[in-house]
Image (cartoon, rainbow, N blue to C red):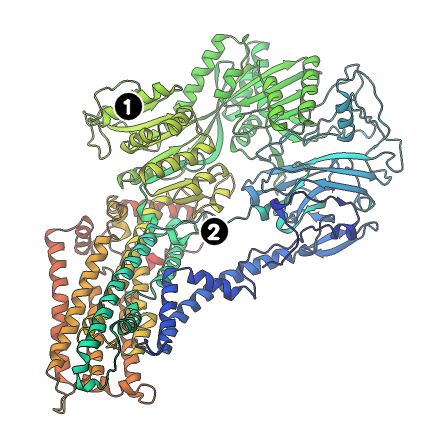
Amino acid sequence: MGFWSRYSYGEDRESYPEFFLNQPERNHNEGFAGNEIWTTKYNVVTFLPLVLYEQFRKFTSFYFLIVCIICFIPAVSPVSPWSTLPGLLFILFVAMVREAVEDFFRFKSDLRENMRKYHVIQAHTGQEVKTRCRDLRVGDLVKIERNRIIPADVVIVGSALEEGVGYIETAQLDGETNLKLRRCPDATQGLRPEELAQLEGRVECGVPVSSIYAFKGAMHVTSVPASSGAPPVPSSPAVSGKDFLTDDEHRQSASVLGFVQESSSGSQHQGLIREESFDGAESAIALETTMRSHNSRKGRRKQEQHGSLIRFDTKSRGRVQEPMTCALDEDHMLPRGTVLRNTPWIVGLVVYAGVETKISLNTKKPPSKFSSLDYRMNKYVLGIFFFQIVLITGCAVFAGKYEVNDASNMWYLGDVGDSSTFLVSIQSFFSYFVIMSYLIPLSLVVSLEVVKVCQARFMEWDYFLRHDNKRMVVKTSNLNDELGLVEYVFSDKTGTLTQNVMNFMMASVRGRRIDGRDGGLWRALEMASSDKEAAEVHDFLLCMSTCHNVVTEKDENGDLVYKASSPDEEAICRGAKENLFAFQDQSSSHILVHINGEIFEAEVLCSMPFSSERKRMSVILRMPDGRIRLFSKGADSAMLERLSSRETKEIIHREEELLEEFSAAGLRTLLLCAKDLTKEEYKEFAEKYHKASTTIENKDELVEEVNDAMERDFFILGATAIEDRLQDNVPETIAYLIAAGIKVWVITGDKQTTAVNIGYSTRLLNRDMDVVIINSSEEEELRQMLHDALAKYEPDVGDNNRGYQLVTSDDEEENSCGHSSEGKVPALVIDGKTLKIALDQFPSEFVRFGKLCKSVICCRVDPKQKAQIVQTVQEEENITSLAIGDGGNDVSMIQQAHIGVGIFGREGSQAARSSDYAVHQFSHLQRLLTVHGRYSLVRNALLTHYSFYKNASIFLVQIWFSFYAGCSGQSLYDDWVMTFFNIYITALPPLMIGCFEKDISDKLIAKYPKTYYHVQRNKIFTLKSLCIWMSSAMYHSLVLFFGAYFVFYNNAVQANGQEGTGLREMGVWVIFVGMIVIFAKLYFVVVTWNVYILGSVILSWFLFFFTVLIEDQTAYFFPDQYNVMTKSLASPSFWLWMLVTIVVCLLPDFIATYVQRQYFPYDWMILQEHEKKTAKNRLPSAESKFLLAADLERRSHQVNTKTYSSSESDLSDEEP
């Protein structure tokens, strides 16, 4: 729902108007968006036209609209117009109901969001007035309490916390569950809500952008009220000490108190950069991060900005004597949809509202995805349409010639007039256009939509797809059948194959291997043979406990709980705590650690955040003894190249060996380093940092250059090794998928050694494979490597086999993929640098070799490359792909693949929210694909085949009849029976088949992976299969018509001995027996005759008989059909003809089915027979056993847990 506006909102704006503090009337006239957000597609006015537009965009709906229009032209319509209209109205009604229900739920959600109440602080008075969320406006001051959702994009200007900070959770925006810190601008820090209502000034903001972590603005405060709790008021600038800024920079730094170092991850872990006044005075410049230089323990202090100095004097009282300007950025911004945590309340200044908030700008439709079955069905419908046009054209031409040449000789036709061949042909063309329209099943599209929704509910209700009693979620049900066609699975590792529950296991300290569990490091510290060795362990533990971005909380028992965006950091902090270096808290400028019960407090001067590009983070601390130290940790690939030339080669070599050892054990490693800084070095760094951070253009790049220069010349402290355990049943799942013919590619950022080790532990690799490791940084060398690898596994390419490293196996295995002359099975391991060259320069060769491999591991891969890998394989191979991941860095890969599966993980729910299917465990992928995906494809294919077949069997009769009716456009069947044929008479059996048919049980699928192979190759819904069904329909229609024709040709005899010939009698005979034939056809194609499918057939037959009987007995409404059915059923000829016709129709089906199953069976047919013979004594399969065992174990740890079972499984006696 929306409203017309004369303003352009969001990113379409050329500029964003400035607004004024505590001047609501003035702000309301500046063209700002209201705070209402509507995600509904329709409103009362647009619902009908938009729904009709959406429906008539579909070919089938538009086609039947044309048919209805033709029916309302009496000169050409062969049927009553009112008999064709209900079918179209029924389709539109179902679509409208579905759209209305879905939109109504969106409306309720939006209304609940818009009607939430918040306290708005009134300008000047400071009174708190309850205001609905939708009524908030830009410039309003809103008081938000703990655990409340932020109602608009606001800048925090006041806080209950002493240091003017607040914590938010951004899971709704980016899926991250860690807390992020936001702080007040300097001009408003410490002001109470009633004092904020007295502020005077204006705020400038940039144009709203969708990037969650991008915000730029400035607050110009011209008046601040006096308050004992207010921050010191700046007096006139004074200059002291050495000026290290230019005149322009003087002016800039005087107007801008600081900056906030930006982080693409949006984490709260930026630090504070201070510049010492090295004459001994305690003065500092806040070059700003999330931690301000405010001494919360002492109420007295002066704070000077060196160079261009703003002096805060706590003795000053009154109003600001000169204007004050503060820079605003993402560290002041609380986006709409985030939740306030660990803070009693904050006051937020609304800067963006409604459609201009970040959550609204990021609310975009996911990429449209269509299943292969839908795509093929649309093509086949179009093909049938063209076939229908050919038939119609033939009938029209024949009708024109017959009318002119032969009709005048038929005395019973009367005077036919002087109609021309052309006019008669045109009239006949439109008449047969209506008659032949029934060849395309009207209800097929609706049936498929309903069935796919039911299939999605079966997936969500499946007990075996639950974890901790939580269901999976289906978001894109139209891809259900696509799950049965997956050929490639692209998987993340951490949190997807592993639990993402990190445990600190081992450590190396300056080349010494130490068990880090159970206080091993503390024991090493106490038992050190020298002070130097003890200091090395001490520094290592100190780096673990201080170089991080962890936030502390207390649980209900008062115990300290660590919260971090990275599970690795959380594990390192817990590991340090186990070794008596317990991180306690971070204030705005200090970090507190308890070392064996004693307090250690250091001043945080700067924090350089982690990012996927930097692969490291650093912190600069002033130690209690006055030393300035830089601690850093990161991936060894990023840290080793930054070591000092003075670091001993022996230590470096030993650390590399230990890193390899840890990686080989499957542990995640980080290298910890440190260096000491002199005051002069830090001062120089602070100056450069300040200059870079106050630059408007290329600020991020310049800041990173300064950081990069500082983060060098390190000395090694040691390395951490963290265990990330595999999820349950991951090895069995991967082995099953590979056996089912699915190629599994694992894409990870881990080291190559770790990745290979994980490959073996997950059964992605085994000792019977040739593990081909390709690493190269040169194009020509990589080209040769790929050529040589192809040569080994594609003998026709060449004979060379050099240029790559082989980890050979001892046994030989016949390989269904590529294989060497010795029969070895290849598997590929490739690193990120090599992968970049391969994707850019040699995508075809890379994908060709990847296709030959049974499995592929890509290591040291960044998030952008993940999506690029999926895209390249899809383009080169034209395959059906599935991507699965658990983190925000997997979203691009998930959306790029044909099917995206997200895992509800510890890193948040962003991947799950962006996916088509969301599960809780990687092992659920096996059942999702091979059971639900396979069933969905089998069912939907059978539903589609049967829908085309039943219509063709009945309505092709009209074509054969037309040649004996002079192609006059006369219909053999009654109008209303034709109308209700698709709407309800034959609608139920296809629906029940689509929901409940099972060709084989899920136990057999779990036991025999190759059962997936048949459907995976899409052999069950092809042009060939459709032609076979249509050929059967054509044969049945021919038997039906000509069988009745020969009976009626010489007049059928009624029970009373009278002749009972007539058009209506023949139509009733044909459609009556035709209904029996099309229902009996199901006997040869349906395997699972449960109560639902059998009941739908019986009910459909009853509905048909009931409809015909009403017409037969209601002469007033249906005079042409009066007593026709009664006389037909009383005729012995009818019953004899019916028996013979049914046998003749179905005898070929019986013979074909017998020959197929007896002499040329598919594998799944053999399994069907085997299952029937062993049905009485069947035992649960191994797969079912371990699934049951796992779920029973989980249930045993739960209290008062209900017993659930798959809704779909309950409907079959084949479930364990």
- The nearer-to-camera label among 2 and 1 is 1
Q: Earlier in the sequence, mark 2 or mark 1?
A: 1
* Disc assigned to residue 1199: 2
On the image, which quarter does residue 423 sit in? bottom left
- Image coordinates of residue 58 in percent, x first then y, are 40, 60
Which amino acid type is shown beneath numbered disc 2? Val
- Image coordinates of residue 325 in percent, x first then y, are 77, 34
Instruction: Please name the residue that numbered disc 1 is placed on.
Output: 787
On the image, which quarter does residue 1144 sit in? bottom left
Q: Would residue 621 be found to the left or right of residue 718 on screen?
A: right
How far apart are the alpha carbons under marks 2 and 1? 60 Å
Q: Secondary structure at mark 1?
A: helix
Disc 1: CA contacts within 10 A as few (<14), some (14-19) or many (>=20)? many
Q: Nearer the viewer, residue 732 or 973?
A: 973
User: Is any atom of residue 1188 visible in this view?
Assistant: no
Above or below 132: residue 264: above
- Image coordinates of residue 259 in percent, x first then y, are 70, 30
Disc 2: CA contacts within 10 A as few (<14), some (14-19) or many (>=20)? few
The residue that appears at 59% across and 28% down in the rendered structure is 609
Quadrant into which the N terminus falls: bottom right
